[in-house]
Image (cartoon, rainbow, N blue to C red):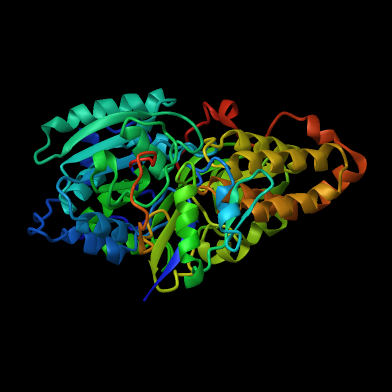
Amino acid sequence: MSAPAAARLPRLLAGVEGGPLDLEAHLAIHGPVPVQPKPRRGRAGELIDTVEEAGLRGRGGAGFPTALKLHAVAGARARGRTVVVNAAEGEPASGKDQALVSIAPHLVLDGAALAAQAISASEVILCVSEDSPQSLRAATAAISERRSLNGEPAISLAAAPSGYVAGQESALVSFLNGNAAKPVFTPPMTFERGVRGRPTLLSNAETFAHLALIARHGAAWYRALGTAEHPGSTLVTLSGPVDHPGVYEIEHGATVRSLIDAAGGEREGIRAILVGGYAGTWIDGAELEAMTLDDGWLVPRQASTGAGVVILLGESACGVAEMVRVARWLAEESAGQCGPCVHGLAAVSERLEDLAWRGDADSEREVSRLAAVIRGRGACRHPDGTLRLISSALGVFAEEWADHARHGPCDACAAPPALPLPDVVRGMALEEAS
Amino acid sequence: MTSRHVRVNPIACEAHGMCAELLPEMIELDEWGYPIVDGKALAPALAAHAERAAAACPTFALLVDRRQTPPPARERTDTGAQGVRRRVPRRPHEPRA
């Protein structure tokens, strides 16, 4: 199915200018769902090879190669496999999965149906955040529209509870199994024992949407954008002092400058950029013009695009006050299961407050010590992600921390929060790249 | 070749601290009483002590695993199988996936 079709942007967001795409509009834009040869008994579908050639990686944050995951589930010995589409999106600064499910639900479901076929799964569960009525509505409508399609797996919809760690893979599986939406101790891994104890392919909603396009246009088409290591396009949620914050589709490796320009430009100087969300890394604003959204540039700085979250912090905001707030929120978002996370993140958050408000300079050393004690000791990566964020904030905002320790709160400390936290993020505008 | 390792299920652990009493060579407690486990391969001389510590844990949170040769140094991923085989039989308290 090698279409000459535009190896350019937008891909996932093609044709969404006029609003959400129903099945008819979706098929008119992207063409019919390609028919895959039925996988031979005991063999994985050919689509997996194409996905491997394309070099598709998961878009939930970890960036795991999708083909490996497909192989793992296809190879698991058990009857009945399940596909779970994760659009729960617990990261408050991310809106791309909700946006995608709201405006292009059929692209996501095409991908899920194709993946189900390739690994011989009989059911698909689409998980959408219960806090997103818009995507719940779109998903419900799309699922009922697809009854007219032939050879579809059974698709059901689940409203996943909100919460930062609730969208974590094992937490979502736990929820779907009727338990609390909290991470569980692994192994067993989801691919061997997931929903109802069956081998389960759980991937991010955007990953499935890319898969749907790869199945239509092939690996070479997919690789015509992006870098060799991270081919293709990706959705990014941009927030901060720009004219049009929102969800954009960019080429992997695009510059942050081009993203900001697409959003109408910055309204003030940029003090720092947070990439990868609240388990991510701060980059000094001085690097903005050189910064690309590409792991080749980011990884040496202990950063990665994660789930495609980019937050700009303007010079009028106080990085110290923002981080104190976010650190406290992250500590509260602990699922409350693992001692080192529950006690450790609370202690780290308190030390940060001591450093910021009480001029206790020893606190910084104490934060580093606590970080070494806590790191790697949670059942999920929440403590490690939080510590990574805090450690980069101590580096990038070093002058500000020192200044606060010496002189107490600054003028900007009292400003309204700039970094999006749950009650602040709602209603963020949805924009597509033009 | 396989080696044996001590591991904690941090969800099940309730900081009783028995493990650090029974296997101080491999386990110390953090300031809140939760075990910090030395991830190195278990010396054969300590194997019996490790088994005893695992059996004594009131919440069965201490596990003694058998692993294929040195574990890969790469970062743990959500889906990366580690070649970990459960040594201690499944207990009723453990979360089922």
Q: How many marks?
A: 0
Residue A67, quarter of the rendered image: bottom left
Pick whichever, A310 or A121, lies toward us.
A121
Could you tell me residue A202's position as x and y percent?
Answer: 32, 46
Position of A358 compared to A297: left or right? right
Residue A172, quarter of the rendered image: top left
- The quarter of the picture where the N terminus of chain A appears is bottom left
Residue furthest to the right in view is A407
Q: Is residue A420 above or below residue B39?
A: above
Q: Is residue A138 visible?
A: yes
Position of A291 compared to A162: left or right? right
Position of A224 compared to B70: left or right? left
Pick whichever, A229 or A175, lies toward us.
A175
Could you tell me residue A160's position as x and y percent?
Answer: 38, 30
Q: Is residue A388 above or below residue A144?
A: below
The residue located at (44%, 50%) in the rendering is B55
Residue furthest to the bottom in view is B1
The residue located at (60%, 28%) in the rendering is A424
Could you tell me residue A127's position as x and y percent?
Answer: 34, 34
Residue A356, quarter of the rendered image: top right
- The quarter of the picture where the C terminus of chain A appears is top left
Could you tell me residue B28's position as x and y percent?
Answer: 63, 55
Q: Is residue A261 visible?
A: no
